Amino acid sequence: MAMAAKAIALGALLLAGTAMAEAPADTILLNGQVYTPKGWAEALAIRGGVIVAVGDARAIEPFRGDASRVVDLKGAAVFPGLHDMHVHTQFAGLEQFACGFGYAAKPAVIAARIKECAAKAKPGDWIVGGNWSAGSFAKGEQNRGFLDKVAPNNPVMLSDEAHHSVWANSKAIAAAGVTRTTADPAGGIIERDAKGEPTGLFRENAADLIEKAMPEPSDALKRKAMTLSTRQMLSFGITSFTDASVRVGNVRTLSGLSKDGIIKQRARGCIVWSPGDADGERLIRTRADYAAPRFKTDCVKIFMDGVPTESLTAAMLHPYHSDPHKTGMLMIPQPALDEGVARFDRMGLHVKFHAVGDGAVRSAIDAVEHARKVNGWGGSAHEIGHSTFVDRADIPRARALHLTWEFSPYIWYPTQITDVDVRNAVGDEMMKRFIPIREALDSGANIIAGSDWAVVPSVNPWLAIETMITRQKPGGGDKTIAPDERVTLEQALRIYTENAAAAMGDRDLVGSIEPGMHADIVVTEKNPFKVPVTEIHDTRVRMTFVDGELVYDAANPPPLTAN
C-alpha cells in the first residue's frame, strides 16, 4: 500500500509539473533569431520573469494564453542580456550635465567652452568638466594660467581622458588650500613649475585635494545623473553592471534608485578601499544597509596603480619608453595589500583590482596567491581590472589561482589615449601585447570586459565586441593594435554574457537563453552574425528585458539625453 501511495503521489506530481509547464506565458517572442547554447531557435516564452520554453513556433504554442503578450520579432535577433563589468554610473551621468568638450579637443576649443560656461555661472561657482588629452597641448601650455584667463572669477577643475589627473585654475587651487609647501600625498603627484609652484595638474591621489574642495552634487542631481546613465545602458542591451567605484558620495543614491525600481539592472557595487581609509572601512562594515534585491554590495575595489599616459603612473615591471628613469607607482605596499586581500577573501567578499601596468598586475596576483595560502580555496574568483599590460609569465597564474581577467576593450574608441598617449609612454614593442585577451582566453581563465565609462565616450558594448574581433577602430581602419590578441564573435559574446554572469555570481539566473533562466534578454534589429564585422558596433537594440519586464523599448524610449 505504501508503494502504491508513493506511485500515485509521484504521478500527481508529474501531472502538476506538466500543467505548470503549460500554464500561459506572460510574454511570447515569435519569428526571431534566438541565440542559445544549442544553436539558433525561433521563439521563446516567458512566465513570471523566467524563460519557460525555447524552440520553434510549434513548441511555444502550448504556452499561449488569452492574456499572453505576443511579439512578432519579424526576424530580429535575441541574445542574453549583456554585462558591463566596469562602469562608473555617477561620473558617467554627471559629466553629461557638466562643462564638457570633445575628446582630444584642441586648446582653443577648450578655452572657448570654459569661457562659455563661465559666462553662464555666478562668480564663485565651480566649473567642472572634461575630458582633456595632454597630447593636444604644446609643452608647458597646459597650466593654471590658461584657465585663469578664461574663467577668472570661478574655480575650474577639468578631468583628463583617463580620469586619473585633473587640471585646476588658481581659484580652485586656493580653495583646496594647496600652496608650494603642500607635500605630495601618498600615491599622488602635484606637478610643479621651476619655482616649485603648483602648475595646475594633479595626478592620481593628488586630484583628491581639489575634488574634496568642490561642493558635493545635490542628491537630486545624483539621482538624475544615475537615472540617465543606467537608462542609456539599457538602450544598448546592458542588463547587468558593476559600478567599480562605490564611495560615501554615491552608494546611497545607487542603493535608493535600485530599491525604488528606477535602476532596473542587476548591479554590484565595489567599495573603494585602501589601508587606513576610514570611509572605505565604514562602508564595508555597513554594506548590508545598502544592499537591495538587484544590488549587491559584496565587492571591494583596490587601486593598485595609475595609467600609462603622459602621467606615467601605471606601475610597470620595466622603465617607460618615454622616461627610462620611471616605472610608475604602486599605490599600496605589498605587505599591506596581502593583509587586506586575505581579510576580504576570508570574509567572502569579492575583490576588484585596478591594475593597468604589468607591475600592478603581478602585485595583485601575488596578493591573491597569499590569500589562497592563508585561507584555502573557498574565496571568490577575484578580478584583475583593466589588465592593459601583463607579463607573459603571469598569464597562466590567474587560472591556477582561480582569478578572473577583466579587460577594457572599449579603449579602441578613436581618442588619443591609446595610439598616441599610451604608445608614446610605453613604446611600440609593449603595444604588440596591448590588452592580451587572446592569451588570457587560451590560458583557460574566465575573461570578462568592462567599459570604464565615463573614461570612454560611449558605453556601447557592441562597439567593444567589434573591436575585440578586429583590434581596429569601430568601422575598421588602416591601423591594427596587437592583432595577435583578436578573438571571435562567439568568444566576445560569451565574455559579455555567460562569463560575466559567472563573475557576478548570477550564472544560475542569467547568461544564456534556455528554460529555467531568468529572462534578461536583448532584441537587436540585425543579427551581428549576419553583418560585416565592421558593422557590429552599429547594432541597434529594439528591446531590453530584465526578469521578463520590458525595461527599454526603442519604439517608445525614455529620455536618453541630459536636459
Image (cartoon, rainbow, N blue to C red):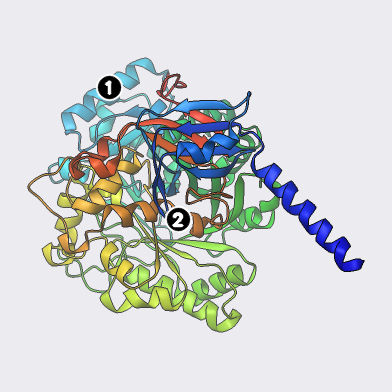
Q: Nearer the viewer, residue 24 or 541?
A: 24
Q: Is residue 444 above or below residue 79?
A: below
Residue at 62% from the left image edge and 40% from the top image edge: 255
Residue at 26% from the left image edge and 35% from the top image edge: 538
When asked about the image quadrant of residue 19, the answer is top right
The numbered mark at residue 189 is none
Q: In this view, does 130 lie above or below 372?
A: above
In the image as oriented, which residue stretches furthest toward the top?
120
User: Would you say the residues marked 2 and 1 are in contact, meaning their CB atoms lie under 8 Å apart?
Assistant: no
Q: What element carries label 1?
A: helix
Instruction: Report the quarter where the N terminus lies.
Output: bottom right
Instruction: Report the quarter where the C terminus lies.
Output: top left
Specify which label sits upstream in the sequence, 2 or 1: 1
Q: Nearer the viewer, residue 319 or 235?
A: 235
Which residue lies under the disc numbered 1?
115
Q: Is residue 347 above or below residue 45?
A: below
Residue at 55% from the left image edge and 67% from the top image edge: 380
Tell me residue 467's x, y (percent).
23, 49
Q: Is residue 46 left or right of residue 397?
A: right
Q: Is mark 2 on a helix, strand or loop?
A: helix
The numbered mark at residue 498 is 2
Give the Cα separation between the discs numbered 2 and 1.
Answer: 48 Å
> What amino acid is found at the position of numbered circle 1 in the picture?
Lys
In the image as oriented, which residue stretches furthest toward the bottom?
373
